[in-house]
């Protein structure tokens, strides 16, 4: 896949947005790699790695993850304007909405609705029950309240991501520029940028390496993607 300079710049800002927000919100897993080397249908990827085994998630962690998911779209909004935002955040929006809905209907993390389950398990659809009847036990008034709570969580997380990137625009710009120069950055470079330092070149970087060189970054493109890291924010070529 060959991206235009405009597409590559937008992807760099999109992925930088995920990384910067994820770095700044509480309890979020640290990012260990950000890349704008296309992988399959994804134009870029931001990878997070938990620091320890996790068997449950706090409300704060889930909230922070939703904020991080919106970092890419917010970065596009800040750099391209509201009318310039692309479809690249479609998967991020889907995941964020699913998490917010689970907070409200499955995990009992809504103050207004309390610790109750309002949604039947998805597996019931495969047991002969229609998906359309999975919410039959919820009244219209409660369904409306559920939607309002989900939107409230989404709006709150989007606002937090927007404020963080607006206040840290210098770090967003620096990370995007580093991605445009090196195509892939790792944790040490991310830490440099977030500390206000100029990021050092990758350890295997030399003067002959360049995003314009077809052979540059080949090793990065073939990095193992089967680890426990979580990739997010990959603007997909959906069109």
Image: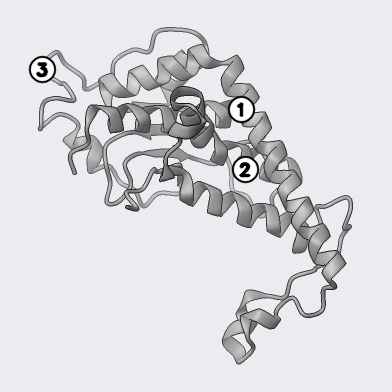
Which residue is rendered at x = 85% and y = 73% of the image? 139
Judged from this view, the residue extending furthest toward the front is 83
200 on left or right of 16:
left
Question: How many residues crowd mark 3 within 10 Å: few (<14), some (14–19), many (20+)?
Answer: few
> Along the polypeptide, which appears first: circle 3 or circle 2?
2
Q: Can you see residue 188?
A: yes
Residue at screen point 75% across, 57% down = 147
Disc 1 crowd rating (10 Å Cα; few below 14, some 14-19, many 20+) is many
Question: Secondary structure under badge 3?
Answer: loop
Q: Name the residue carrying label 1.
A: 162
Q: CA distance from mark 3 to mark 2?
A: 39 Å
SS for callout 1: helix
Label located before the other in sequence (2 or 1) = 2
Q: Quadrant of residue 43?
A: top left
Crowd class of label 2 (few under 14; some 14 to 19; many from 20; radius 10 Å): many
Q: Is residue 84 above or below residue 134?
A: above
Residue 4's mark? Answer: none
Assign the N terminus to one quadrant of the image.
Answer: top left
Which one is closest to the eye, mark 2 or mark 1? 1
Give the alpha-carbon distance from disc 2 to disc 1, as whole Å: 12 Å
Which residue is painted at 49% across and 35% down in the image?
72
| Sequence-earlier tag: 1 or 3 | 1
- Residue 99 at what x, y percent from top left? 64, 54
**What number is the disc on residue 66?**
2
Disc 3 target residue = 208
* 196, above or below 115, in the image: above
Q: From the top left corner, tell me how far across and down residue 95 is, in percent.
A: 55, 53
For the residues marked 1 and 3, what is the alpha-carbon distance in whole angstroms?
37 Å
* Residue 154, horizontal then vertical, whole percent: 68, 44
Report if residue 19 is visible in the image: no
Element under label 2?
Answer: helix
């Amino acid at each position: 896949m060959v991206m235009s300079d405009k597409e590559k710049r937008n992807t760099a800002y999109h992925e930088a947005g995920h990384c910067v927000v994820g770095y700044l919100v509480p309890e979020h897993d640290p990012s260990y790699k950000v890349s704008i080397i296309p992988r399959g249908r994804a134009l870029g990827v931001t990878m997070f790695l938990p620091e320890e085994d996790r068997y449950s998630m706090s409300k704060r962690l889930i909230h922070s993850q939703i904020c991080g998911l919106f970092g890419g779209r917010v970065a596009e909004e800040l750099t391209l304007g509201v009318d310039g935002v692309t479809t690249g955040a479609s998967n991020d929006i889907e995941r964020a909405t699913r998490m917010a809905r689970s907070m409200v209907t499955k995990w009992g993390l809504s103050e207004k609705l309390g610790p109750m389950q309002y949604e039947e398990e998805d597996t019931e659809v495969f047991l002969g029950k229609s998906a359309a009847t999975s919410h039959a036990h919820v009244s219209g008034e409660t369904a409306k309240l559920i939607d309002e709570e989900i939107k409230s969580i989404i709006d709150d997380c989007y606002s937090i991501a927007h404020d963080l990137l607006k206040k840290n625009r210098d770090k967003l710009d620096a990370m995007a520029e580093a991605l445009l120069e090196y195509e892939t950055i790792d944790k040490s470079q991310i830490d440099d940028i977030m500390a206000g330092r100029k990021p050092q070149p990758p350890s295997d970087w030399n003067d002959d390496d360049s995003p314009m060189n077809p052979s540059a970054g080949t090793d990065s493109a073939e990095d193992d993607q089967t680890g426990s890291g979580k990739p997010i924010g990959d603007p997909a070529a959906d069109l």
